[in-house]
Amino acid sequence: MSDSRKKAILRKFTRDWVAGYLPPTGFAGGGKIELLDLAGKVASYELKDVKWVCFVRDFNSGELHNPERLLRKNFAARPRSEGLWLRLRLRDGDLIEGLAANDVTLIDQEGLFLTPPDTRANTQRIFVPRSSVVELEVLAVIGAAKRKDAAPEQESLFQQNLTA
């Protein structure tokens, strides 16, 4: 296996899931996702059947029903990282929040990449196909933190005019 493939859990709307490997980007095309499963076979899945794809740290999470371990689906407070804070309602009624990049990838692909609320959990990134999203709400646009630069020098209030 090459280093360019990442561990992923593909969750379907039927609640079953498949573990395998995907490239970090560009894996969805033509309405399908091709996943290299743990047996080394490439399996194709229709995007319309996929709820989300979670890029995970570990397959052996000990969870049979929730291997992606998405325990928190909402931010407890305003996120600190920059990006678009989004809330998505999926076809099955599930709500999930995440941070998306504020760039052309938001409209350019067959789905959205989100950074989940709990980055210390097993899931590092989530891909949500556009066909899964019923409603998308932008909660905030979070910009880069402003740096406190050195205070500008105060101009002298009383300048002498030496040209007389």
Image (cartoon, helix red, strand yellow):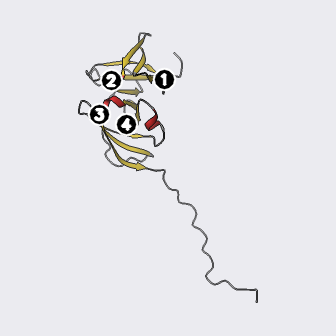
Q: Which residue is mark 2?
A: 48
- Displayed quadrant of residue 94: top left
Q: Which residue is mark 3?
A: 71
Percent position of residue 148, x then y: 53, 60
Q: Earlier in the sequence, mark 1 or mark 3?
A: 1
Label 1 element class:
loop
Looking at marks 4 and 3 on the same chain, the residue that comes earlier in the sequence is marked by 3
Q: CA distance from mark 4 to mark 2?
A: 22 Å
Residue 164 location, quadrant: bottom right
Which label is found at residue 116? 4
| Mark 4 or 1, nearer chain start | 1
Camera-side residue of 19 and 84: 84
Q: CA distance from mark 4 to mark 1?
A: 19 Å
Q: Does residue 61 appear anywhere in the picture? A: no
**Circle nearer the viewer, 4 or 3:** 4
Compare marks 2 and 1 and give the one earlier in the sequence: 1
Whichever of labels 4 and 2 marks the residue nearer the N terminus, that label is: 2
Circle 1 is placed at which residue position?
A: 23
